[in-house]
Amino acid sequence: MRTIAPPFTVAAPSGARIRDRLRVDVADEQVLSLVGQHLGRHQRADLAERVAIGLVPVKDNRRAERKKKLTVVSSSRWAGAMTRASEDQYQLSLRCLHDERAGLRRAVRAITRRLAVPCGQRKGRVRGYADQNERFHKQRRLQVLRRRLAVVEQRIAEGRPAVVAGGRRLLHARHHLAEAGLSLAQWRERWEAARLFLTADGESGAPHGNYTICVDPADGSMTIVLPEPLRHLANAPRGRYRLGCVVAFSHLRQEWLDRVTANRAVRYDIVYDPARDRWYVDASWATDTTVPPTPHEIRAARARLLAVDLNADHLAACVLDPHGNPIGRPVTIPMDLTGPASTRDGRLRAAITAVAALAEEHGCAGIVIENLGFTDARTTGRETMGRGQRGKRFRRTVAGIPTARFRERLRGIAYHRGLVLIAVDPAYTSRWGAAYWQQPLQQQDKQTTVTRHHAAAVAIGRRGLGHRIRRRPGVTANDQRIVVRRATGQTGPGPRPRGTTSPPRTTGTPHEGCRTRLDRDDQLVLFPGPKTARGAPAPDASHLARNVLIRPTPANNARSGRDGACASP
């Protein structure tokens, strides 16, 4: 069994991003297209120059020289945004290369280990391939992976990643138009839209937080600074173009108004969606960093938590009290992630919103999820997740679970609702949850069908609270009026003198009463039922025998044969 990582609270979002639609007319659309194409062409040239420079310290990337060259064909602020975007794209591409190298190395190691074992045999936990045919194909795949790994390592050593402005997937779709469901004109329109550049970085102290793309909060009007070669298209003073539409952000509008009225930096991005034939403007800014409470502080506050188990088609949730006990019925939230990307994202947001509403309804202080990441499923899943069509479907299901997007969406929604997000190690939660919590949950609520995913949610929540997943032996049964027993190793609630320790308790040790007793000498004993003259119990009076609270006396103790001991019913 591997080591379980401790739980941790997910950091709050470092920024906010909102969107509004631009209802532009034909003239505005032409101006936006010309500006975006002009700036995009020069930004791609700057990106190519940055890649050619290679991996060098920041002071040697010649940004000032490149910015001076771009200022001639645009403006100083447009040039600063283009050089910043080129540097961000370059660093992102390098990180992607390192991630690809790590994945290829894992795949090579997995295949190499299995090739070292003869067919149909097993050495330790490594199993060889089923037959010679599969082994032959794996050897060919190993050669392909090693060749790809050599290319990636060469690019990392040179510091020159391959970057496609517009997206590699869209570029490959050019040669498979029928499979993509696009015509040549539709593909060309999407390709040109993806290569537009209409991004203006915010500037604190500038009018309304951005001088290049300025949105007036009073009337919602938007003005854009035109590049130097396109200044003849200006319809406003100082080489600016005023759009004929109005911008009115609805989501997080008050936060946006607070920033623009205080002239704090706000970044704007104007994008075009050719599939819907719509223009949009995105506003983004950095938020103040706040340190969330730790899981230990949440546990010390004795707050409830909502545990969520992420699955391919639904979310299993359960509310837990500070002691790790489930409260109420387990909840299943459906989550159908089929269809286009926009539909999947909308359904995911709806499911996350339902989770946040459920946490608020039950007064929970936070939400507990698993720190999932299926990188191994995408790299070594062919070797560890089955073979054939069944294994392929399982790998596709696992790889299709939106773990990263679910965590990011939930982090943002939880932050705005005042909820804390806790992530735990996902090891053994499904297995131990099904073994220790599925049956008790089903006994607690027989009207709801409890699955192993609900039990896994309980395991996730207990781990987030710092408790063990396994239940202690001999815990209190469901109905204490019928079954009276205590957990093994649980200390008695009665007070004891300072400096003394309680004796070790074992199964069957009688406890000395509870906190609700009237006096310390009051004990729970069995009141004897009526008997006949010969000492036999009455035939119709068996229902009168019940547990009652009486004060022990020497006569009662002598009758029961014990000195103040609690008689077992």
Image (cartoon, rainbow, N blue to C red):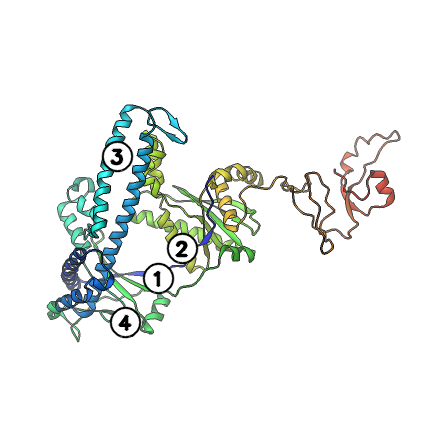
What is the C-alpha distance between the residues marked 2 and 4? 31 Å
Asked which secondary structure carries label 1, the reply is strand
Which mark is drawn over residue 15? 1
Reading the image, the residue beneath label 4 is: 216
Q: Are marks 2 and 3 in contact (CB under 8 Å)?
A: no
What is the C-alpha distance between the residues marked 2 and 3? 39 Å
Residue at image position (33%, 47%) is 344
Name which residue type carries label 2: Arg
Q: Residues within 10 Å of mark 3 (few under 14, many from 20)?
A: many
Which mark is drawn over residue 411? 2
Asked which secondary structure carries label 3, the reply is helix
Residue 122, image quadrant = top left
Q: Position of residue 402 (x, y in %)?
A: 35, 46
Q: Is label 1 or label 4 in front?
A: 1
The mark nearer the N terminus, 2 or 3, is 3
What is the C-alpha distance between the residues marked 3 and 1? 42 Å
The mark nearer the N terminus, 4 or 3, is 3
Q: Residues within 10 Å of mark 1 (few under 14, many from 20)?
A: few
